Image (cartoon, helix red, strand yellow):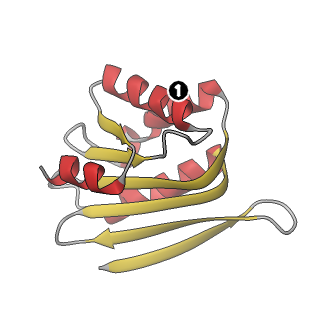
Amino acid sequence: MEVLTLFCVIVGEMKMPWNLEFDSELNFIITVYSGDVTKQDIEESTKASLSKVHKDRPALFLTEFEDVVLRLTTLDIYSVFEQWIPLGATRENRSALVVSESSSIFEDVKFHETVCRNRSWKVRVFRDREEAMNWLFG
């Protein structure tokens, strides 16, 4: 598995790391966010993810949010998927989002899921990684 670790500096002493792990054989990306997450962070990690996957077959994405504070507006969340097609994503891809139900961002992530599913994207929110992995590979 190839591992890319990327850091986006926000302001001053705060860093928002997002890590990508890519399994070329399975065409599988794991992205882990922690700390403050901005629209720019989402856009940069999405570009990095979609630049790695093989375009000739569906890709699988597991995204985990660990102690995250989303710095996105409702409109930002609503429009996240709009960059996917220009970057080569297809609706055959599957994306599992893992976030604790007690997390302050749970409802925002569920809103993202609803927006995506209403546009025929295969996006689901899960409370734990095992459940998400079962759906991705099931």
Q: Nearer the viewer, residue 97 or 61?
A: 97
Quadrant in which the N terminus is drawn: bottom left
The x and y percentages for residue 105 are 59, 38
Measured along the vertical axis of the image, is residue 122 above or below residue 4? above
Task: Identify the residue at horizontal 51%, vertical 57% (top origin).
Answer: 45
Q: Is residue 59 visible?
A: yes
Residue drawn at the location 55% of the way across and 31% of the way down: 108
Q: Residues within 10 Å of mark 1 (few under 14, many from 20)?
A: some
Observer-nearest of 9 and 82: 9
Q: What's the residue at 44%, 67% (across, down)? A: 20
Q: In the displayed image of the protein, which residue is found farthest to the bottom?
A: 2
Q: Nearer the viewer, residue 131 or 9?
A: 131
- The x, y position of residue 33, in whole percent, is 55, 58
Asked whether, in this view, residue 35 is left or right of residue 4, the answer is right
- The residue nearer to you, when weighing 121 against 57, is 121
Dot 1 corresponds to which residue? 78
* Residue ID at (33%, 20%): 118
**For the residue marked with disc 1, what is the amino acid?**
Tyr
Residue farthest along the top direction in this orientation: 118
Q: Is residue 60 visible?
A: no
Does 84 sit above or below residue 8? Answer: above
> Picture coordinates of residue 103 (x, y %)?
57, 42
Q: Is residue 64 left or right of residue 77?
A: left
Measured from the top left, where is residue 82 in percent x and y? 45, 33
Picture layout, residue 5 above or below residue 27: below
